[in-house]
Image (tube, rainbow, N blue to C red):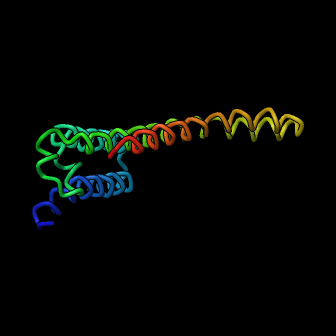
Amino acid sequence: MSMFDFLIMALPVVFLIASVLIAVKAVSHGKSRKRATLMQLASFAFVFAVCMVCPFIANAASGDAAGALAGGADGMAYIGAAAATGLSCIGGGIAVGNAAPAAIGATSEDPKAFGKAIIFVALGEGIALYGMLISIMILSKIG
């Protein structure tokens, strides 16, 4: 692998790490968390768009330059698998973040409600498991 290939693969990672550091610094200096979160989402969308437009970035790890220029189907499959897992984990985190405090509150008022309350937390975790299952199915179809 040449130095250029390494730089092409490292560029999205460096960009995302830099955006995280900038967001943390901005929040510690008194900027709003909402703005920092929006900046993080924008940087993720930018990197995702670059990877979608330039499939050779996603396919550079395999060293198949001809396949990358011909369409990069494997690279797109990897991006799809990552998107399925990442987005489902974000959704599961949001669901568990809302359901778990409610389950704890219900259990503190009535300990018999624990069984019913924990089911809603488990349903939120199921979203992440379904995303991982879809990713495994996508990756099993790749050569």
Q: Residue at x 80, y 32 (%)?
A: 116
Q: As rendered, which of 11 and 76 lies closer to the eye?
A: 76
Q: Which percent across, then down, holds residue 96? A: 61, 39
- Residue 44 falls in which quadrant of the image? top left
Q: What residue appears at the point 42 percent right and 44 percent down from the top-left corner?
A: 140
- Picture quarter containing residue 93? top right
Picture coordinates of residue 35, whole percent (x, y): 34, 40
Q: Quadrant of residue 53?
A: top left
**Residue at the far front in the pictured view:** 143
> Residue at the spot x=61%, y=40% of the render?
125
The one of 116 and 131 positioned closer to us in this rendering? 131
Q: How many marks?
A: 0
Determine the residue positioned at 22% across, 59% down. 10
Quadrant containing the N terminus in the rendered view: bottom left
Q: Position of residue 75 (x, y in %)?
A: 26, 45
Nearer the observer, 120 or 6: 6
Give percent across and percent down for residue 54.
15, 42
* Rendered view: 40 above or below 9: above
